[in-house]
Amino acid sequence: MAATGLFLCIFLLGHLAGNLQLFMTDEAGKLQFNEYAKFMTTFPAVKILSYLTYFSIVFHAIDGLLLTLKNRKARPVGYAYSRPDKNSSFPARNMAILGSLMLVFIVLHMSNFWVKMHWGELNVDIWLDANGNRDLHSVVMHSFKQLWYVIVYVLCMVAIGFHLWHGFQSGFQSLGLNHPRYTPIVEKTGYAFAVIVPALFGIIPVYIYFFG
Amino acid sequence: MNLKLKIWRQKGPKDNGKMVDYPISGISPDMSFLEMMDVLNDQLVEKGDLPVAFDHDCREGICGSCSMYINGEPHGPGRGITTCQLHMRSFADGDTIHIEPWRAAAFPVIKDLVTDRSAFDRIIQAGGFISVNSGSPVDANAIPIDKHDSDRAFDAATCIGCGACVAACKNASAMLFTSAKVSHLSLLPQGQVESRDRVLAMINQMDEEGFGNCTNTGACEVECPKGISIENIARMNRQYLGAAISYSPPKATGGGD
């Protein structure tokens, strides 16, 4: 869980760097973003990274599911009255449910953009831009003009924020990377990561909806 | 003080058990929680009912026997205390108090609030020892040990094995207990020799007993009556990872063991 989770944190940073280009909603921005999208789907080094990412997502989800099932079995009879809020945080106790939400989001997200970019039928799902690149930019702009999709996207970013709030420093702890001097730094970095990264992801669709 | 107690009653390991209400009056706020339970049991015996079975021994917070899940927390409200160190002044007149046994597949209920915690003993037996005779006490500082290491080892050694960590954990994981035992030996030179065998054997036994896995919620260290830190869990993870990757236990080559 820890190794794949932390790898996916790095993936998020890369993904975010790409997404930030979507703030450019004009014609030049469109051509640049489509050029970038083409590079990301064809460059061999990126391909290797993307397979690592697919593997990490699948492994993280399956391992998480097995872990949750095993942990449930460890307490077959629950407490009649329990106050877990007294000793642990909400995200820490709900990693599985938050993770499941994210898996649903990933499926929706990939069927919208990733499938269209890779295998979408030309002039039906996706068109070509002036440079002859697949016009993912327009697909994104169109999607984020739909209010329901913007709302779902933003809510999922809140869920991912909670997931990261616990997950970031938990990954370090699971790998045994705990030290009186560095753990407070890791924790603070994790909290900042959990707020800033999903917030930036979430602002993009809102910006496109209102100003795109 | 007048209180409403809701207590888990279970006749035996096979019985289903249920929560039963017991109103109680005339409790002094100066009583310890276990003294309050004694008063209740006296009243139950006078009425001809079976007293509530619960574990207790030293009643001064050092034996690790007492084990009640009180108002949703192991050892009740308050930090750094066992059930016997909890006093009735922590509650208000008229309060409802829920009292349950530890809940974990590895800690089956024997009767009422008494659970079988011998799973912890078997984890210790798997590796919580050093195999050489340490002999008679040597002169102080004959073996140079970093003060910080000896302090950390001693902090880990304060674990009384009550099982509050398992009871508090949403996964019923025994990682805090096991890591405290692993740390207290592996931080000292006498214990370092066998540290790789120890960490592999104790974690293996922990899994066999049916405890859950650690998801780092940190509930255990909050509820631990001895304030044992999850820093020990990270240390154990580190040692386990190292041993699992780099170490293969020696095979017997004759000459007895």
Image (spheres, rainbow, N blue to C red):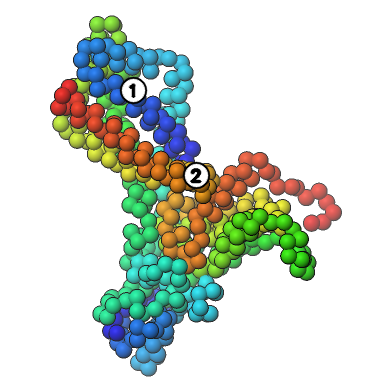
Amino acid marked by disc 2? Tyr
For disc 1, the chain is A
- Screen quadrant of the C terminus of chain A: top left
Visible residue check, residue B14: no
The residue sitting at 46% across, 59% down in the picture is B221
Q: Is A104 positioned to the left or the right of A4 in the image?
A: left
Q: Where is residue A85 drawn, in percent x and y?
A: 33, 59
As drawn, which residue projects farthest toward the top?
Answer: A131
Quarter assignment of residue A98: top left
B15 is higher (above) or lower (below) than B230: below
Spot occupied by residue A168 in the image (x, y as percentages of width and height): 42, 41
Q: Nearer the viewer, residue B113 or B131?
A: B131
First in sequence: mark 1 or mark 2?
1
Looking at the rendered structure, the number of numbered marks drawn on it comes to: 2
In what element is the residue under mark 2? loop
Task: Give residue B232's position: percent from left, percent from top.
Answer: 54, 54
Q: Which residue is labeled 1 in the image?
A: A18
List the single residue furthest toward the bottom: B46
